[in-house]
Image: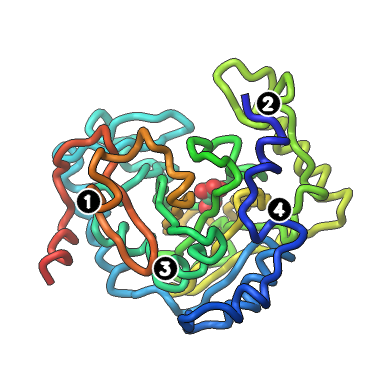
Amino acid sequence: MHTKQDWMDGVPWIDRPDADVDAYVAGLAEDPGFDLAAALHRWRRDGFMLFENVVDRRLIDALENDIDHLRRHYMDFDLLVETSGVQKHLHDLTQDELNSPGLKFNSIHTISRAAARLSLTREVSVFLSHVFRDAPCAMQSLTFYKGSQQPIHIDYPYVRCQSPLAHIAASWIPLEDIHPDSGPLAYYPSSHRTEISGFFDWGGGSILLEADSQRQPMELSDYLTERMAQAGIEPIVYCPKKGDALVWHGNLSHAGTAIRDHARTRKSYVTHYSSLQAYPKAHLKPEAPQAGYIHHANGGYVFEYSWLGQQNQLPSVALDSA
Ligand SMILES: O=C(O)CCC(=O)C(=O)O
């Protein structure tokens, strides 16, 4: 069982009360190419960081092309997808399910080089390497076609294979300009601070959703809604342009807002990261990290999952030989 003490004992340096950001940045040999001190101060205060115009649009287009290919040749690929909250294998979907707006691809980076590269977008990966003082590693990814309309939540009760548990963060990369009526993401600034969030008890002091938890995800949402109201925190609705990226802390409250125009898409790509130290050992191939990775760039890794053999790859695999 994981308790709030486990979370507190394992927080990265940046979340510790005595973190000296300025001394840390002054001691760095390499210039990260952006104002790292300001970014780390902001992270401590607000629990998120926005980067504008940093994502390689060619990679976004390549991922779009991969997704299009995947939809047309879905029988040729093995990928987990989520439809109406249920996980399935892509090749088991009916045509209706394949076309359903709520369809979410899980960890497309295992078959899309474009996705793997997007997960390690320079600013995102470099920034997280300083947040963790360790290599950020993509643990899993989610690809959305429409707004999720997911109620307010935090990630770690659900994304929780890493150890220490608190070594978790996420990035959100729009695959198109996001329209306010498409059900954008919303996030709650500074809600990552444990004095604001507290710890939701799933039963018996556990801070994670387990198979035998006595509480439901909707109860976590109600709890967080109340905490936000108590702290007077209003959500920020995120309507980025293609090329932008948002990075958020694993304890930052966020939600998918209501879709006002159901004709609109809200194409987006989310990666959840741990530090290398915290990356689940059981997910690594024996030869990793020296080998056994799909992509290694900007101080970060996207590993092959230990349980997957050779996977049929989407067209952006050609990037490897470009
Ligand atoms: O993009 C969204 O609407 C929700 C994404 C999200 O909550 C997550 O990936 O943790």
Mark pair 1, 2: CA separation: 36 Å
Q: Identify residue type, mark 2.
A: Ser
Q: How is the image coloured?
A: rainbow
Instruction: Residue under label 1, please give it.
Output: 291
Q: Secondary structure at mark 3?
A: loop
- Tell me if label 3 and label 4 are in contact, CB under 8 Å: no
- Between marks 4 and 1, how big is the CA–CA gap? 34 Å
State which tag comes first along the sequence, 4 or 2.
4
- Residue contact at pointers 4 and 1, CB within 8 angstroms: no
Question: Callout 3: 10 Å neighbours few (<14), some, many (20+)?
Answer: some
Residue 252 rendering spot, x and y as whole percentages: 66, 52
Q: Which mark is residue 192?
A: 4
Residue type highlighted by circle 1: Ala
Q: State the residue position of label 2.
A: 206
Question: Circle 3 sits on which residue?
Answer: 176
Residue 305 at x, y = what percent?
29, 40
Evaluate whether residue 13 shows in this view: yes
Disc number lying in front (3 or 2): 2
Label 3 close to label 2 by CB (< 8 Å): no
Q: Residue at x 30, y 50 (%)?
A: 289
For ligand 1, tell me if the residue under mark 1 lies within 8 Å. Answer: no
Q: Which residue corresponds to the image point at 69% horizontal and 57% vertical from the top-left?
A: 15
Question: Label 3 vs label 4: CA separation?
Answer: 27 Å
Mark 4 CB within 8 Å of ligand 1 = no
